[in-house]
């Protein structure tokens, strides 16, 4: 039988094949190792439906892809994020538990609660910044009519004694103090009404249970677009690109309130430095992706990655601003 000549295998082919097989085995081994790890938990101090929860779920999806491991979001609402913060403190420093926090738990609670159960500086370490978030004040037009400014809300409240309740995401929070300062400076019959997150604030605001409320732009914006709510003031040093017609609190004469908020990822103190570096790299990678940026734009939040050191500086600066706000509101720690 005639045999066709067969060329001997090229040495280069063997090396390429061996390299490809080794790479495939290494990838498979890494995936199996990642799958064998416990889930990475991201604690959130507010209920589902709020902006912090939404950011956490988008972040979990991105980290899942980058780290090739299971990432879950655990909501532990209550006490303005304090319950979730204390859960982080109690968690082992093994890289399996993180805390997506806003400014309140990291910078306000230490100023307003005598024994909060944790010290953010001592008990937590920063992983990285996720976003800059600005709060807005919204009103229900069906309740307050044509009110379109802080002065208009103050006048409406004075003309409707006992009805000037303003929903805020937490007691002794910067929105809580903002309402107190507004009432004092504008001589208005306004009172803050604390909730457990901005999700419930918006629900009651839309339902007309409160005439006004403060929450994230992401939580309010769907109802603003539907014509059910109207934004009359925004926090931060300048107007928002998505609401250029709405002035800041400072523009309307409310001094000392309106610091831009942060959304940041924290880990328990003692977490291995190598893991913190890896986690920050993964976090920055996720936060910079167009998909994540777009999701946060929908929430009215600006995706903002940072190093751990940059986050530590932001937390200190926010604490300084909040200390001045607490003093301005004449708050006395119980």
Image (cartoon, rainbow, N blue to C red):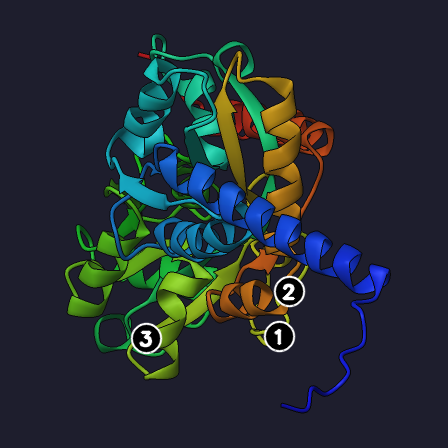
- Whether the residues at callouts 3 and 2 have beta carbons within 8 Å, the answer is no
Q: How crowded is mark 3: few (under 14 residues within 10 Å), some or many (20 or more)?
A: some
Q: Mark 2 points at which residue?
A: 239
Q: Mark 1 points at which residue?
A: 244
Q: Which residue is drawn at 43% across and 44% down?
A: 69
* Callout 1 secondary element: loop
Q: Is residue 292 above or below residue 3?
A: above
Tell me, yes or no, if residue 159 can be seen here.
yes
Q: Is residue 118 left or right of residue 24?
A: left
Q: Report, in whole angstroms, how far the alpha carbon at label 3 lies from the one at label 1.
A: 17 Å
| Residue 291, image x, y percentages | 56, 69
How many discs appear?
Answer: 3
Q: Report, in whole angstroms, how far the alpha carbon at label 3 lies from the one at label 2.
A: 20 Å
Q: In this view, does 114 lie to the left or right of 250?
A: left
Nearer to me, 189 or 249:
249
- Whether the residues at callouts 1 and 2 have beta carbons within 8 Å, the answer is yes
Q: Which mark is residue 315?
A: none
The answer to which image quadrant residue 220 occupies is: bottom left
* Callout 2 secondary element: loop
- Nearest to the eye among marks 3 and 2: give it: 3
| Residue 285, image x, y percentages | 65, 52
Tell me, yes or no, if residue 250 can be seen here.
no
Nearer to me, 18 or 273:
18
Tag 1 or tag 3, which sits nearer the N-term?
3
Q: Name the residue under label 3.
A: 223
């Amino acid at each position: 039988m005639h045999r066709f000549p067969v060329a001997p295998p090229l040495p280069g082919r063997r090396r390429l094949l061996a390299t490809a097989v080794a790479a495939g085995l290494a990838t498979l081994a890494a995936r199996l190792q990642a799958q064998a790890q416990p889930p990475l938990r991201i604690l959130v101090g507010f209920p589902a439906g709020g902006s912090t929860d939404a950011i956490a779920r988008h972040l979990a999806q991105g980290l899942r892809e980058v780290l090739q491991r299971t990432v879950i979001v655990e909501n532990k609402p209550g006490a303005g994020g304090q319950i979730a913060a204390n859960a982080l403190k109690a968690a082992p420093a093994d890289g399996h538990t993180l805390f997506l926090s806003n400014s309140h738990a990291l910078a306000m609670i230490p100023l307003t609660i005598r024994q909060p159960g944790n010290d953010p500086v001592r008990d937590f370490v920063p992983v990285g910044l996720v976003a800059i978030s600005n709060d807005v004040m919204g009103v229900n037009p069906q309740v307050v009519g044509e009110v379109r400014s802080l002065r208009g809300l103050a006048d409406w409240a004075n003309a409707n004694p006992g009805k000037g309740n303003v929903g805020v995401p937490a007691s002794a929070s910067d929105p809580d103090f903002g309402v107190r300062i507004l009432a004092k400076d504008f001589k208005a019959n306004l009172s803050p009404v604390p909730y457990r997150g901005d999700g419930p604030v918006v629900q009651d605001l839309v339902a007309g249970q409160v005439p006004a409320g403060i929450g994230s732009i992401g939580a309010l914006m769907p109802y603003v677009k539907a014509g059910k709510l109207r934004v009359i003031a925004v926090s931060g040093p300048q107007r928002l690109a998505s609401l250029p017609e709405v002035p800041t609190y400072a523009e309307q004469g409310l001094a000392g309130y309106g610091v831009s908020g942060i959304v940041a990822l924290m880990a328990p103190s003692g977490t291995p430095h190598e893991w913190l570096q890896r986690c920050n790299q993964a976090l920055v990678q996720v936060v910079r992706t167009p998909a994540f940026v777009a999701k946060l734009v929908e929430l009215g939040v600006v995706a903002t990655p940072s190093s751990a050191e940059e986050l530590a500086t932001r937390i200190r600066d926010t604490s300084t601003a909040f200390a001045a706000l607490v003093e301005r509101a004449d708050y006395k720690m119980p």
